[in-house]
Image: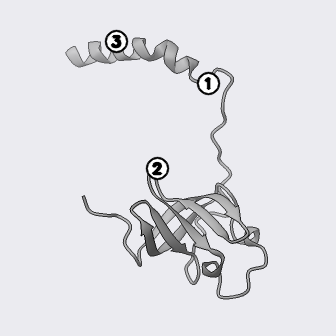
Amino acid sequence: MQEPYKIGSIVTGCVTGIQDYGVFVRLDYNKSGLIHISEISSKYVKDIHRYVEENEIIRVKIIGQESSDHYQLSIKDIDYRITNRHDSKIQETASGFKTLAMNLEIWIHQKQKESKK
């Protein structure tokens, strides 16, 4: 399988955390990375929150690989903004997984019936 994250490529990711030293970004379910504060801007960065927010979808440049699932990232000198802000969050419901647990057998049975037709 070819590695989709090559050094120099620009990919999208979701900001999962912000610390004084940098920004954590989830690239997909198995891959993540860190934008070190020095890779945010060519200018002095006083407050990282002025550049990104948690849950924001951004473009990042792969500048290094620390392990098979963790990358060094940069937003310096690229157009990293995709939208103004990404505010959609999955809201947990009171029923949780109960709906799935109650209906799973029914849905499987229905699909099996449809596939036999």
Identify the residue under disc 2. Answer: 29
How many residues crowd around disc 2 within 10 Å: few (fewer than 14), some, or many (20 or more)? Answer: few
Label 2 residue SS: loop
User: Residue 111's spot in the image, x, y percent?
Assistant: 32, 18
Residue 42 appears in the picture as rendered: yes
Residue 50 vs residue 85, the one in the foreground: 50
In space, the residues marked 1 and 2 are separated at their CA atoms by 21 Å
Type of amino acid at the residue the image marks with label 3: His
Instruction: For mark 3, give the secondary structure.
Output: helix
The residue sitting at 68% across, 51% down in the picture is: 87
Q: In which quarter of the image is residue 80?
A: bottom right
Which mark is first along the chain, 2 or 1?
A: 2
- Label 1 amino acid? Gly
The structure residue drawn at horizontal position 24% and vertical position 58%, both measured from the top left corner, is: 1
Residue at image mark 1: 96
Q: Residue 3 at x, y = what percent?
A: 31, 64
Tell me if label 1 and label 2 are in contact, CB under 8 Å: no
**Residue contact at pointers 1 and 3, CB within 8 angstroms:** no
- Mark 1–mark 3 Cα distance, whole angstroms, equals 22 Å
Q: In this view, does 36 lie above or below 23?
A: below
Q: Residue 2: which disc?
A: none
Residue lying at 57% horizontally and 17% vertically, measured from the top left: 98
| Sequence-first disc among 2 and 3 | 2
